[in-house]
Image (tube, rainbow, N blue to C red):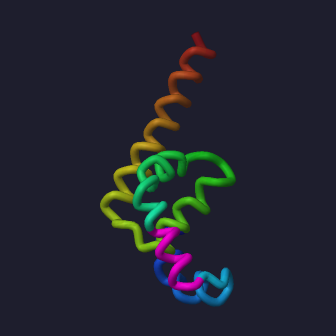
Amino acid sequence: MNYYIGIKGSNTILHKAIKFNDKETKKAEEKFRRYGPAILFFSWLPIIGDPLTFVAGLLKYDFKKFTFYVFLGKMFRYVMTVLIAYGIIN
């Protein structure tokens, strides 16, 4: 959902609310392209996870890549949760 909101509001949010100019937007896009997979892997983290997915939408990060890396991150979270719970129970 945050990704979609980011895509639909990208012009308004980046240029009017945050006051990004085209040069700053391009620089942010380059950084996100370089570190996007690593950043999106941590989308499962509380508090910072939602803004990470929102930024991916703002910068129109490839949806297939977005889905893959967010899925990996969330899967990691749930596997760790099950392993921890299993360790506590036994």
Residue 55 vertical position relative to residue 16 in the rendered view, above or below: above
Q: Position of residue 8 (x, y in %)?
A: 49, 83
Residue 17 seen in the figure: yes
Camera-side residue: 77 or 19? Answer: 19
Residue 15 vertical position relative to residue 43 in the rendered view, above or below: below
Residue 5 seen in the figure: no
Q: Where, quadrant-wise, is the C terminus in this rendering?
A: top right
Q: Position of residue 83 (x, y in %)?
A: 51, 22
Q: Position of residue 40 (x, y in %)?
A: 48, 52
Camera-side residue: 33 or 7? Answer: 33
Camera-side residue: 84 or 12? Answer: 12
Camera-side residue: 22 or 61? Answer: 22
Instruction: Please give the name of the residue rendered at 35% of the width and 65% of the height, measured from the top-left corner.
Output: 63
**Image check: 62 left or right of 22?**
left
Q: Residue furthest top?
A: 90
Instruction: Let me know if residue 72 is in the magenta part.
Output: no
Q: Residue furthest left?
A: 64
Residue 29 vertical position relative to residue 13 in the rendered view, above or below: above
Q: Position of residue 15 (x, y in %)?
A: 59, 87
Number of numbered discs visible in the structure rendering: 0
Instruction: Please give the name of the residue rendered at 47% of the width and 72% of the height, measured from the top-left corner.
Output: 59
Instruction: Please give the name of the residue rendered at 56% of the width and 76% of the height, measured from the top-left corner.
Output: 24
Main secondary-structure element of the magenta-colored stretch? helix
Q: Which residues are magenta?
A: 21-29
**Image check: 18 left or right of 63?**
right
Instruction: Please give the name of the residue rendered at 68% of the width and 53% of the height, measured from the top-left corner.
Output: 47
Q: Residue furthest front?
A: 23
